[in-house]
Image (spheres, rainbow, N blue to C red):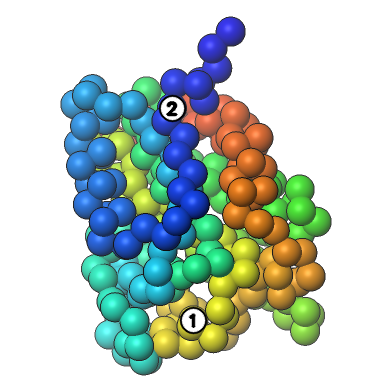
Amino acid sequence: MTSELDTIEWRSEREPVAYRQALDEMTTRNAAIHGGAARELIWLLEHPPVYTAGTSAAAAELLDPRFEVVAAGRGGRYTYHGPGQRVAYVLLDLNKRARDVRGFVHALEGWVIGTLGDFGIEAWRAEGRVGIWTRDIGGGEAKIGAIGVRVRRWVTMHGVAVNLDPDLAHFGGIVPCGIAEYGVTSLARLGKPVASAAWDEAMRARAPEFLAALDVPCPVEEA
């Protein structure tokens, strides 16, 4: 029997993809999905080092532009992407599901939290702080995953990035997501190294739960 996941293109890249290239592909695919000319897409990849600016990015939070800075068009503020950070771009048609952006973000968070748990990392949402949080090696809270989305004509773009084993010093060029009081961490720093292929496989295994969470109807006003 065909599952919902079987109807979605699942793409896992082994080589880095330039951020601007990915952004162009997402924009084109978003329009094609809306027009019924392409399947939905879940795209897992890594980028060469880059800082991306969301629509709420404040200039003062770009501390050291040592890498290219790209306006992403997604929600949120400044984020770093680079080798060792696994990004999942999620392009789904919410016209076929609950048209609920908040519910979509909540489901994304749950997908990542569940997958981190499969690798022995307890993670959670934090009230008033965007992203996925965990206990760092010093005992304080630190961000292990960042979320930023955009919805055009009820088709989603962008998604979630999880720190497997990036160079954490590269986050020092920005105030990540505008939150200066907390640091960032990774699975490797927490003693749980995970290869990108294993992470992708675990995300795919939990994808049906994520998709099911999007099917709860929630009346909203027209976008």
Point out residue 144 in the picture as x, y percentages from the top left corner: 61, 67
x, y percent for residue 220: 34, 34
- Callout 1: helix, strand or loop? helix
Quadrant of residue 155 in the image? top left
| Three-letter residue code for mark 1 | Phe
Tag 1 residue? 171
Query: Exactly how many numbered labels are in the figure?
Result: 2
In the picture provided, is 153 more to the left or to the right than 106? left
- Residue drawn at (33%, 46%) of the image: 157
Amino acid marked by disc 2: Ile
Indicate which disc residue 94 carries: none
Q: Residue at x 61, y 49 (%)?
A: 197
Image quadrant containing the N terminus: top right
Q: Residue 183: tell me if it is visible.
A: yes
Please tell me how crowded label 1 is: few (under 14), some (14-19), or many (20+) other residues with Cα within 10 Å: many
Front residue of this view, candidates 138 and 164: 164
* Image x and y of residue 143, in percent: 60, 71
Q: Position of residue 96 (x, y in %)?
A: 37, 23
The residue that mark 2 highlights is 8
Quarter of the view holding residue 202: top right
What's the CA distance linking mark 2 and mark 1? 33 Å
SS of the residue under disc 2: loop
